Amino acid sequence: MPDGAYLIDEMISAKSIAARVEALAREIHDCFAGTDKLVVVGLLRGSFVFIADLVRELDLPVEVDFLEASSYGDSIESSREVRILKDLRGEIEGRDVLVVEDIVDTGFTLAHVLTLLRARGPARLKVCALLDKPSRREVDVRADWTGFEIPDEFVVGYGIDYAQRNRNLPFIGRVRFTG
């Protein structure tokens, strides 16, 4: 494990993220047009910036809820053991649900969350992920909408952290460990 010394290089600019969020919102709107209310479930903590920007762009009636699942802790590697740290407050049975994820990496967390939510009987269950690292996938799971496909790099910013740091960066940055 790195000793903590690192540099951050911008990988995806704030402007590129904003443009992609607008495009994703249009695609999601087209899918869910006519819904009574879309339940948007943000996977904490990494998705909080993305979900805030995305729901502001959605021209649909939305309800926002959060679920916190973790398989990383403060590590840069998945433990492959997914823990639910905070569950939804509302019911999703018979409702249209959009799960918003920051990054799909190994797929363990998203697969676990989707299994949990499907058991609750939503009318439709779709996924929007800001980032996708298909080269790291260990579980066959895919987002219905993806902002950006990225290589196997450790990234931070726009809500995504390393040991609870760098969530506030307005861009996605590649972490280069120096120690």
Image (cartoon, rainbow, N blue to C red):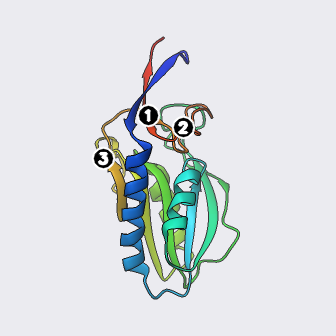
Q: Using the numbered discs, state the Cα–Cα distance from disc 1 to disc 3 in whole angstroms.
A: 18 Å
Around disc 1, counting alpha carbons within 10 Å, would you say few (fewer than 14), some (14 to 19), or many (20 or more)? many
Q: Tag 3 or tag 1, which sits nearer the N-term?
A: 3
Residue 72 screen position, x and y as percent: 55, 39
> To which quarter of the image does residue 14 belong?
top left
Mark 2 lies on a secondary structure that is loop
Mark 1 lies on a secondary structure that is strand
Relative depth, front residue between 149 and 70: 149
Residue 173: mark in rendering:
1
Q: Is residue 91 above or below residue 103?
A: below
Q: Amino acid at mark 3?
A: Pro
Residue 169: mark in rendering:
2
Whether label 2 touches label 1, CB < 8 Å? yes
Q: Of all residues shown, which one is farthest toward the front?
A: 15
Left or right of 174 on screen, residue 93: right
Question: Which residue is label 3 attached to?
Answer: 134
- Residue 115 in view here: no
Left or right of 101 on screen, residue 87: right
Q: Amino acid at mark 1?
A: Gly
Residue 2 screen position, x and y as percent: 50, 18
Q: Residue at x 55, y 45 (%)?
A: 159
Q: Residue at x 56, y 82 (%)?
A: 37
Relative depth, front residue between 33 and 84: 33
Q: Residue at x 52, y 54 (%)?
A: 50
